Image: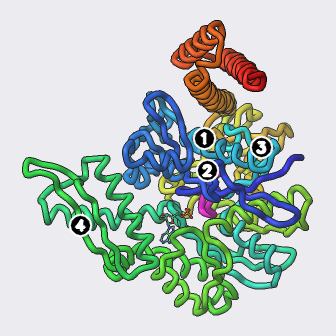
Amino acid sequence: MGRIIGIDLGTTNSVCAYMDRNEPKIVINEEGGRITPSVVGFTKVGERFVGDIAKRQMLINPEATIHSVKRLMGRTFREAREGIRLVDYRVTAGPGGECLVDVAGRSYTPQEVSAMILQKIKKSAEDFLGEAVTEAVITVPAYFTDRQRQATRDAGTIAGLNVLRIINEPTAAALAYVHERGRASTIAVYDWGGGTFDISLLDVDRDVAEVRATRGNNALGGADIDDRIVEWLIDRFRSEHTIDVREDKIVMQRLRDAAERAKLELSAAPSTEVHLPFLVSDQHGPRHLQATLTRAAFEALAEPLFQKTIEECRKVLADAKIDPRDIDEVIMVGGSSRIPRVQQLVRELFGKALNKTFNPDEVVAIGAAIQGGMLEGEIKSVTLLDVTNFSLGIEIQGRRFAPLIPKNTTIPAQKSQLVSTVVDNQRTVKIHVLQGESLDARENVSLGEFELQDIQPGPRGVPRITVRFAIDANGIVNVSAKDQRSGVEHEISIDAPHGMSRVELERARDEASQQARVEEESKELKKLRQEVEQELVKLETFLRDRRGLLPKQDIFELEQALKRGRMALVKASADMKNLQSLLGYLQRFHAHLAEKVRQQARTH
Ligand code: AMP
């Protein structure tokens, strides 16, 4: 087995870590950074960029710059409504109601876009480590549903990664804590990133990390805080200039960018200036936006969001029946946990100082790498006892929900349910699997429906079919059914109504790897063109400076070579082979002429 990398695939940023002689380390990406923005940018000519370069084009090309795609993963268009409101690119509903991202003339599933980010991370890891990387542990918010986990695993598959384990972000942070400390304690991991919030309570010691309870909100993150500031800025601008800028995508992107910058500054300073010159123009000329936002005003704007996270913390303590004073350590994870007011609220709730020894941006990836190290057998295993974050069950008569595996059950977990027929000689039984806490089936997340077929005919209520529901260590649901009378057993795949089929996945993976090859080749081609260009410039300089020392025939040949070189560079069809042989020829010719000139100088 090769080296296993740990990936924190974040809404805003992604981080990759690996184990180096028992110590977790961060992979430095191609741009020299420890963090890769989870942003994919498309250009008009079909080029694609991921990370910092893509983030930079967000301001000028918001419709072709895909960010926060994690908010769309494994969700229906209807479920993702809030996330879609915060982006400027086009999201549409696919045939099954799933989200599709429309960009650069085609539609991509969120899994395919996430795969582009993972491909970039894989490539950075390979370049940095100097070896092929195919195995990974990827983290997800504890509050991700089965569909969102499946979608994350599928994104890994499309990117050419074998996803050995999906682990919850807070559990990963706890593993980092165990690795560093290894002291028996009860810890709280408060994880607030760009798009999601999670709170988990765990009992840890040197050998075990046991999740006691977890709660969260998949649609509550730093982007929502930015949105509050954006609303405030829009109001200010409207009251000053009576202009509503909401419909202008570029203006909205500038406002979002400025709002995030203001928020970051307010984590360190008591007030900040928002200055956006030439925001819009009308018949009276350009209009500028100038505003001062104090920390107190910012806190008042965002307080309801802060309180939502504290409410979840209270609920999780109640779920686990733990008194806040019995928590030994509070670990803060995710960029939004840096906000001073948030830290104050968490400190007050738990009545103790926060543990700030871990880098909130990196600790999750570090934990994923540690999990990878355990799977490799490189470091001693810590038994991970994670829990289900939602109740899993089926729909029963009257559109009601019957939970089979309640939330906060330790995984892996399984439960069997006996089902039968309601009419004589019924040959099929339909089962609808759901995740959620509402007794009304329609309010929960549908994982899919399946039909048990070929049931042995018999009077109603007589057939006995055992349906087994299992949640594996990744939090992914598996279902199997056994007809007790015939003994026939079926492994049932739930037809995820919004997931990708195996065939679609394979097609997407082949396409992604083909695209990666094309991109790699085009990068190499660009580099080669530059080398040819440099060689031509050198030869032109050589000819200018040494013309008087060269025989006529050489001058003629050199001019011909320069012409051919220039022609090759403007030809779009020039391929690697042609350019390589041209470069070789130019270099050899240059060396030959230089030697001739040197010899001449010696004989004179
Ligand atoms: P993550 O998903 O953990 O990468 O967190 C990204 C989110 O954290 C974004 O919404 C950032 O704007 C936010 N963030 C990062 N640093 C800070 C900071 N110092 N203060 C407030 N928010 C921050």
Q: What whole-number distance in Å separates the C-alpha atoms at marks 1 and 4? A: 38 Å
Q: What whole-number distance in Å separates the C-alpha atoms at marks 3 and 4? A: 50 Å
Near mark 3 (Cα within 10 A), the count class, few <14, some 14-19 or many ≥20, is: some
Which disc number belongs to residue 162?
Answer: 3
Spot occupied by residue 336 in the image (x, y as percentages of width and height): 51, 70
Q: What whole-number distance in Å separates the C-alpha atoms at marks 1 and 2? A: 16 Å
Which disc number belongs to residue 116?
Answer: 1
| Local SS, label 2 | loop
| Local SS, label 1 | helix
> Is residue 196 visible from the viewing direction of this image?
yes
Relative to 251, residue 116 above or below: above
Query: What is the quadrant of the C terminus in the image?
Result: top right
Amino acid type for the residue under numbered disc 2: Glu
Amino acid type for the residue under numbered disc 4: Gln
Near mark 1 (Cα within 10 A), the count class, few <14, some 14-19 or many ≥20, is: many
Sequence-earlier tag: 1 or 2: 2
| Local SS, label 3 | strand
68 with respect to 201 (left or right): left
Which quadrant of the figure has residue 332? bottom right
Residue 79 belongs to magenta span: no
Q: Identify residue for label 4.
A: 290
313 and 128: which is toward the camera: 128
Amino acid type for the residue under numbered disc 3: Asn
Kindly identify the residue that appears in the image at 68 percent across and 31 percent down: 513
Sequence-earlier tag: 2 or 4: 2
- For discs 1 and 4, the disc positioned in front in the rendered view: 4
184 with respect to 48 (left or right): right
Q: What whole-number distance in Å separates the C-alpha atoms at marks 2 and 4? A: 33 Å
Amino acid type for the residue under numbered disc 1: Met
